[in-house]
Image: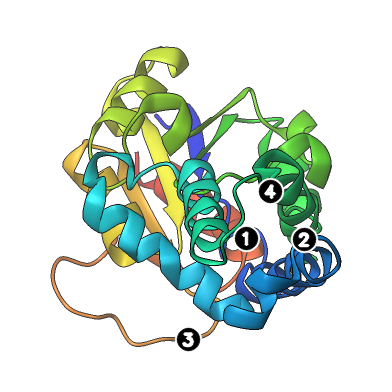
Amino acid sequence: MIKAITFDLDDTLWDIWPVVERAEERLHDWLKVRYPRITDRFTPLELRELSQEVIAVWPEIAYDRTRLRKEALWLAAQRADYGEFDVDSAFAVFFVARNAVEPFADVRPALERLGRRYTLASLSNGNADLRLIGLHDLFKFSLNAIDVGAAKPEPLMFDLARQRLAAQPEQIVHVGDDPEHDVLGAARAGFRTIWINRTRRDWPGGSRADAEIASLIELEQVLTDWEREK
């Protein structure tokens, strides 16, 4: 019997990359006024790519997207010869804009219906703030990589979710868009897996999810069919 459903967030419940790009532009505009040497030297994309240099030096913080973004901004400030830099204010500009997402139209109606039958939780590698987004009321709890100290597909987030849900792995369904982080990671943890493929991509190879859907409306039918098999 299925007791709980865990959901990825970015690119599962909303389209994230256009939002991130707008947030980076907003940050770039803010920096241009206050720290113009940074924007003279770096485009928004180049500021993002500095995170890879940070990871090369500190691979142990690769899971923490907030710290990566802040360290990348510090690196940009240093290279632009700023001895003082308000990294927290800079990041806050990005963070508010990064959370100005528009959930897909199927999200709230489907989750409200599912929440009447199952316990719902979210598991994300990103740093989305569900309170800012306005979906926090739909989930019993939310975990992200920063909270747990590891990113999917590592098992820790799935294990902690299972413990908090007080369920056996096979009683939990995980829904996500990423074949590796979501499908492979959840399958290794013993969860049932559903690949949400909103853009009709080809499966990249390897063991497939237990089911594939294009919207959360289809998720409800999959769960109903599984329950009828029992």
Q: Are marks 2 and 4 in contact (CB under 8 Å)?
A: no
Q: Amino acid at mark 4?
A: Phe
SS for dot 2: loop
Name the disc covering residue 39, or none: none
Q: Amino acid at mark 3?
A: Arg
Which residue is at a point 49% across and 41% down the rendered structure image?
A: 67
Here the colouring is: rainbow
Q: Are marks 4 and 3 in contact (CB under 8 Å)?
A: no
Q: Nearer the viewer, mark 1 or mark 2?
A: 2
Looking at marks 4 and 3 on the same chain, the residue that comes earlier in the sequence is marked by 4
Q: Nearer the viewer, mark 2 or mark 3?
A: 2
Crowd tier of the residue under label 2, counting other residues whose Cα lies within 10 Å: few below 14, some 14–19, many 20 or above: many
**Nearer to the camera, 101 or 106:** 101
Q: Quadrant of residue 142?
A: top right
Q: Amino acid at mark 1?
A: Leu
Residues at marks 1 and 2, CA–CA distance in whole angstroms: 18 Å
Give the residue pinned by disc 1: 216
Q: Amino acid at mark 2?
A: Val
Residues at marks 2 and 3, CA–CA distance in whole angstroms: 22 Å
Residue 165, horizontal then vertical, whole percent: 45, 18
Does any portion of residue 55 appear in the rendered image?
A: yes
Residues at marks 4 and 3, CA–CA distance in whole angstroms: 34 Å
Q: Are marks 1 and 3 in contact (CB under 8 Å)?
A: no
Looking at marks 1 and 3 on the same chain, the residue that comes earlier in the sequence is marked by 3
Q: Quadrant of residue 49?
A: bottom left
Vertical comparison of 45 with 187: above or below: below
Q: Nearer the viewer, mark 2 or mark 4?
A: 4
Residues at marks 1 and 3, CA–CA distance in whole angstroms: 14 Å
Which residue is at a point 47% across and 57% down the rendered structure image?
A: 75
Give the residue pinned by disc 2: 101
SS for dot 1: helix
Name the disc covering residue 200, or none: 3
